[in-house]
Amino acid sequence: TVVLESDYASNFASATTQMTFGPLTAVGGTWGTRVAGAVTDDYYRFRVTAVSGTWTAAAAFGIK
């Protein structure tokens, strides 16, 4: 399971989850649905919250 988080500080002291992906169990793509409301944070990260086995992954996001 992977989450996209945002925060106003680079150390993510008070990160907000913007999207949750998973559990990812097979090869393929996953589309996330944005959280309603304005996001004014400057920093974003993908964070793995649960994993089993060995995985290779790539991630990207865009801001509209």
Image (tube, rainbow, N blue to C red):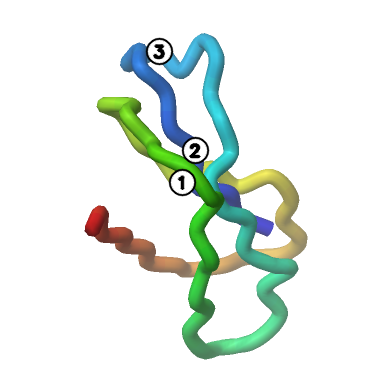
Q: CA distance from mark 1 to mark 2?
A: 6 Å
Q: Where's residue 3, x and y in %?
A: 58, 49
Query: Which numbered disc, 1 or 2, marks the residue closer to the eye?
Result: 2
The residue lying at 26 percent from left, 59 percent from top is 62
Secondary structure of residue under mark 1:
strand
Based on the displayed image, in which of its 4 quarters is residue 26 positioned? bottom right
- Secondary structure under the numbered disc 3 in the rendered image: loop
Query: SS class of the residue under badge 2?
Result: strand
Amino acid identity at mark 1: Phe
- Looking at this view, is 27 or 35 the one in front? 35
Residue closer to the observer: 62 or 39: 39
| Numbered label attached to residue 11 | 3
Q: As displayed, is residue 40 above or below residue 37?
A: above
Within 10 Å of the Cα at label 1, are there few (<14), some (14-19), or many (20+) other Cα atoms?
some
For mark 3, does the 10 Å Cα neighbourhood hold few (<14), some (14 to 19), or many (20 or more) residues? few
**Residue ID at (32%, 16%):** 10
Amino acid type, callout 3: Asn
The residue that mark 1 highlights is 46
Please state the horizontal and vertical placement of residue 63, each as a whole percent of the image: 25, 54
Name the side, left or right, on which 31 lies relative to 58: right
Whether tag 1 and tag 2 are in contact, CB under 8 A, the answer is yes
